[in-house]
Amino acid sequence: EAQVTQNPRYLITVTGKKLTVTCSQNMNHEYMSWYRQDPGLGLRQIYYSMNVEVTDKGDVPEGYKVSRKEKRNFPLILESPSPNQTSLYFCASSLRPTSPRSYEQYFGPGTRLTVT
Amino acid sequence: QKEVEQDPGPLSVPEGAIVSLNCTYSNSAFQYFMWYRQYSRKGPELLMYTYSSGNKEDGRFTAQVDKSSKYISLFIRDSQPSDSATYLCAMRGRRAGGTSYGKLTFGQGTILTVHP
């Protein structure tokens, strides 16, 4: 089954304690992206990756890091989480932007993060 | 001003009603227009896609794009309780370079409830 998986699904942590949210896709997609979803603000892009070892900032990258060492995996790293990073996070993947069907992004189930 | 504006609702309708969901946008470079549906505790899933202006119909769903007015709509006919979800409009430009390459810009999402 084609899917994007994220782990963990729920996480409660304390300010300053480094954490990683994993994301993996099995569709051989080049493009991967992280979003956060907050009430009234919709989905905002944090970071994206065009392919292995190619990453760039989205709209709200402050406080986050990513890496893309393998095509299927795109972890999101919070080196020193703060309460304003409490949010619902989604990983998404799609074909490369030049592909005719690149408009369709496949989303993971989400990770609800609470930072106290 | 946000690039994409969407009335967050919530919208509550009786089963069988016609539902109209709308988004306005300001970026004339947007060429791809999507509607995603997000059920509670799930990631968004692509529902409809339209390239440039025009209408597209898929079963009970019709997507309309009016680029001259920078306005898109999603109509749901004969709405069902299973249509209860958050509906997100999303848009993307076509240009092949720069940081917006492949990036989707989302509206805030409209929460729809269809009651029996």
Image: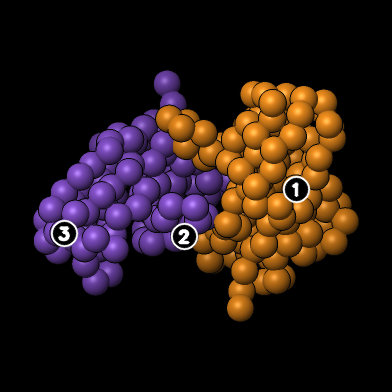
Chain colours: A orange, B purple
**Which numbered disc flags the more N-terminal residue, 3 or 2?**
2
Amino acid type, label 3: Pro
Figure check: B41 above or below A79: below
Name the residue at 65% across, 34% down: A114
Q: Mark 2 = which residue?
A: B45
Do callouts 3 and 2 mark residues in contact (Cβ within 8 Å)?
no
Front-lying residue, B35 or B25: B35
* Disc 1 from disc 3: Cα separation: 39 Å
Q: Are both tags, 1 and 2, on one chain?
A: no
Front-lying residue, B71 or B45: B45
Between tags 3 and 2, which lies in front?
3
Name the residue at 84% across, 35% down: A18
Total number of numbered discs in the rendering: 3
Front-lying residue, A87 or A75: A87
* Disc 1 from disc 2: Cα separation: 21 Å
Kindly identify which numbered label has been placed on residue A21.
1
Name the residue at 83% across, 57% down: A52
Q: Are both tags, 1 and 3, on one chain?
A: no
The image quadrant of residue B7 is top left
Q: Is mark 2 on a helix, strand or loop?
A: strand
Name the residue at 24% across, 60% down: B81
Kindly identify which numbered label has been placed on residue B116.
3
Q: Chain letter of disc 3? A: B
Q: Chain letter of disc 2? A: B
Across and down, in percent, residue B4 comes to: 41, 34
Figure check: B27 above or below B1: below
Label 1 crowd (10 A; few <14 / some 14-19 / many >=20) = many
Amino acid type, label 2: Glu
Q: Chain letter of disc 1? A: A
